[in-house]
Image: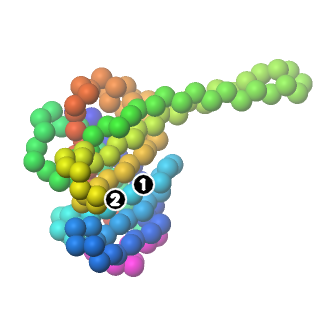
Amino acid sequence: MTEIVQDLYVTELTISNVSNAPFIIDAVGSYPNKLIVTDEILQSWGIEPDRTLIGKNLILTLESLEDSENDVNLVQIDHLEKVIRRRYRYLSEPSFLEELEFVLSCNTPRISSEPNPCPNYQIKLSIKESDYDNLYNLSANTLLKLRCQLK
C-alpha cells in the first residue's frame, strides 16, 4: 500500500449556488490543485467551509486501494512523470547541473457524461522518487483514496 502526504496552501474558496457542486477549493503545492466538493464531504474531513479557510494549510493524503470501494473520494492516476532538467554552464569550466522531478497527476474517474460532476478532484503533485517507484509498480486500474484535513 502506498501513501502520499502533501501540504497544500489554500488560495481560494468559491461558494456557488450550483446544487451538486457548491464548494470549489483552490490549493497550491508545487502545482495548482482544484477540489470541487459538497458540504457533506467537507464535514467528513472536519473542515468548515468559510472564509477563514483561505490562507490555511491543507494536508492532502492519497492512499492506494487494492480493491475499488464505493467511495466518492477516489481518484485515478492520470499520469506519472519523471522530469529531467539539465542546466549547462559554459563560463570558466563547462559543466551541467541535473535536476530530477517526479510528478503525479490524478483526477476523479468520470462515470457518466454529466457536465459538472461532484466531487471532482484535479490534483497535480511533485512527489518523492520512492513514491514514484511505488506508484509505477501498481496496476493500471488502481484507485487512490483522497483525504484532507487542516493543519
Chief secondary structure of the magenta portion: loop
Q: Residue at x 17, y 68 (%)?
A: 40
The residue carrying pointer 2 sits among few (fewer than 14), some (14 to 19) or many (20 or more) residues within 10 Å by Cα, namely many
Q: Residue at x 13, y 39 (%)?
A: 68
Residue picked out by circle 1:
33
Highlighted magenta segment, given as a residue range: 48-55
The picture quadrant where one finds residue 35 is bottom left
- Secondary structure beneath label 2: strand
Front position in the image: 2 or 144? 144
Residue picked out by circle 2:
35
Asked if residue 84 lies in the magenta stretch, the reply is no
The picture quadrant where one finds residue 19 is bottom left
Compared with residue 19, is residue 105 higher up or lower down, i.e. above or below? above
Asked if residue 49 lies in the magenta stretch, the reply is yes
Q: Tag 2: residue type?
A: Leu
Q: Residue at x 19, y 49 (%)?
A: 112
Q: Tag 1: residue type?
A: Asn
Compared with residue 46, is residue 50 higher up or lower down, i.e. above or below? below
Q: Residue 125, position in %: x, y? A: 43, 44
Q: Residue at x 43, y 60 (%)?
A: 27
